[in-house]
Amino acid sequence: MPDYAIAVHGGAGAIHKNLEREAEYRAVLDAALDAGKSLLEKGGSAVDASVAAVAVMEDSPLYNAGRGAVFNANAFCELDAAVMDGKSRKAGGVAGVTEIKNPVYAALAVLRHSRHVLLGGAGAHDFARLHDVATVENAYFHTEERLRQLHEAQEKGRVQLDFSEDGQAKGTVGAVARDQNGDLAAATSTGGLTNKSAGRIGDTPVTGAGTYAENGICAISCTGTGDEIMRIVMAYDIAAQMRYTGADFTAAAKAALDKLAAIDGEGGLIGITAKGEIYLPFNSKGMFRGSFRAGDAKNFTAIF
Amino acid sequence: MPDYAIAVHGGAGAIHKNLEREAEYRAVLDAALDAGKSLLEKGGSAVDASVAAVAVMEDSPLYNAGRGAVFNANAFCELDAAVMDGKSRKAGGVAGVTEIKNPVYAALAVLRHSRHVLLGGAGAHDFARLHDVATVENAYFHTEERLRQLHEAQEKGRVQLDFSEDGQAKGTVGAVARDQNGDLAAATSTGGLTNKSAGRIGDTPVTGAGTYAENGICAISCTGTGDEIMRIVMAYDIAAQMRYTGADFTAAAKAALDKLAAIDGEGGLIGITAKGEIYLPFNSKGMFRGSFRAGDAKNFTAIF
């Protein structure tokens, strides 16, 4: 059987070197990798593994997704998530959901049970409830630290990536996986940008922007300034370079990140190729990231 | 000065050859082309011309956008629209709006005034109102014929492209333009699929799926089964083929439409290249379409 492998990220940005609680952040990356690989080693699918890894990070208040989502400009949490199956090339996403505990589970329900790719707002809630995805009050996502970050952003008149100046860094989360069948998948989940406009849909739930998977090429989950990532269709641009020019992942991702920088965007991504090679490039100061390949003695995790 | 040019579409699908009211459908395509070219001939921008052309089609009850939008599964109209500026590569879109008379104007407001690319639902409404985009009650979009189509779709248990069996065909609308500066733009607007799930966001407002523009390459507006168009990132896939393989528009569009057919999708697109060449390919029975290039004696329009 070919090797299985998984990679995760917890967001990219201007993470301060004096990051407190680094061990806690790394522990969540480890737990996310473990959740994914426990499925993969038993023959589970790349889709299930990437979703399981993302769900662990959604449940942590440390990362900007699920429980730890940032506030929008109305002091409300609106979450986006997606998952894509590289084998069927089916995708599922939810946008602007406010009462779903694990948006990535709602995205999976869309992938599995809807003829559509992306559901937003109340329609997404109704669909998720119909498929037994757990719901919560929006207050579940509210934390004092996020509110402080919102007030800080509003005082400065900024819409910002979720990395506060005090070293308490958080970010969008994602996972990519290759299973024992050689199938690829990608999943991403986020609270978006602190002080974002109400209703803003970012790159995360958009097929080809923040999330993309295609067997035979690669699976990708992006993080960073999502509006700019959408404009360059970043995840699909990397896959397209690989398919149409024969570029390797490193060169294709570098070209895409250069395009992102050229329009004043910043960010990073995790990618896994058809052969199970893992790449974790970024153009920001840091990116929470981790990976595991079958046969490795232990998980790899890093921030800077 | 280089030539200016514009193309429009009013949707693709199984349009019946015995289409009644063909002259009325063509008259709207003509009016849309006229609205765009009157701006272009005076030196107006490709963005303004494509938006003006789309707005004319939104105001017609014949096409599935704006006034003529189809009903979702809840007998409610939820509309999507986008516009992209090939010069700046900035994009603006709205998803699931229910009370905006011309969704393409709201998309233009996002492009011009938001730091974001895509706004959904209530947030999109608030933003549009703030920028003086006209609003209406959802009932503005309701017509007896659309309700009949919904009931027919629900009886048959179908989610369908908006082409009813009686020859009353309608569809998503879009425009692409090249202005006298050589700048490109694309705009698209839709009511989506009859009997679509509430909250469903299609390809139309998604940068790279249904709408894409990049100076030096092309501008594209798509129509058809949007969920499948999203999965193959159709508009950007065409641009990527042209950039990365040197394919001409015809070959790139054919390859993309073949991919669409391979996952049981159907549709078409309109494209304009950096040189102002216009292409109107589709893999369905027909596509409402029209074009005009500076120097032409009159507008071209066609359905089959």
Image (cartoon, coloured by chain):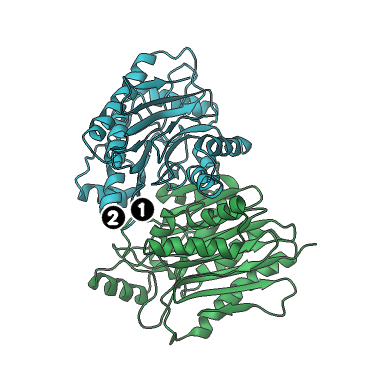
Chain colours: A green, B cyan
Q: Which secondary structure, mark 2?
A: loop
Specify the quadrant that holds the N terminus of chain A.
bottom right
Q: Chain of mark 1?
A: B
Q: Position of residue A198 (x, y in %)?
A: 32, 57
Q: Which secondary structure, mark 1?
A: loop
Distance (Cα) linking label 2 and label 1: 7 Å
Q: Nearer the viewer, residue B73 or B243?
A: B243
Q: Residue at x 34, y 32 (%)?
A: B6
Q: Position of residue B287 (x, y in %)?
A: 46, 25
Residue lying furthest front in this view?
A: B1
Q: Residue at x 56, y 80 (%)?
A: A27
Q: Which residue is mark 2?
A: B114
Residue lying furthest left in this view?
A: B132
Kindly identify the amino acid type of the residue bearing the numbered disc 2: Ser
Q: Is disc 2 in contact with disc 1, using a CB cutoff of under 8 Å?
A: yes
Q: Residue at x 35, y 42 (%)?
A: B185
Kindly identify the amino acid type of the residue bearing the numbered disc 1: Val
Query: As displayed, is residue B178 above or below residue B91?
Result: above
Q: Residues within 10 Å of mark 2 (few under 14, many from 20)?
A: some
Q: Chain of mark 2?
A: B
Q: Nearer the viewer, residue A74 or B288?
A: B288
Q: Nearer the viewer, residue A242 or B173?
A: A242
Q: Which residue is mark 1?
A: B117
Let me know if residue A108 appears in the view.
no
Q: Position of residue A197 (x, y in %)?
A: 31, 59
| Snapshot quadrant of residue B99 | top left
Asked whether the residues under marks 2 and 1 belong to the same chain, the reply is yes
Q: Position of residue B35 (x, y in %)?
A: 26, 29
Q: Residues within 10 Å of mark 1 (few under 14, many from 20)?
A: many
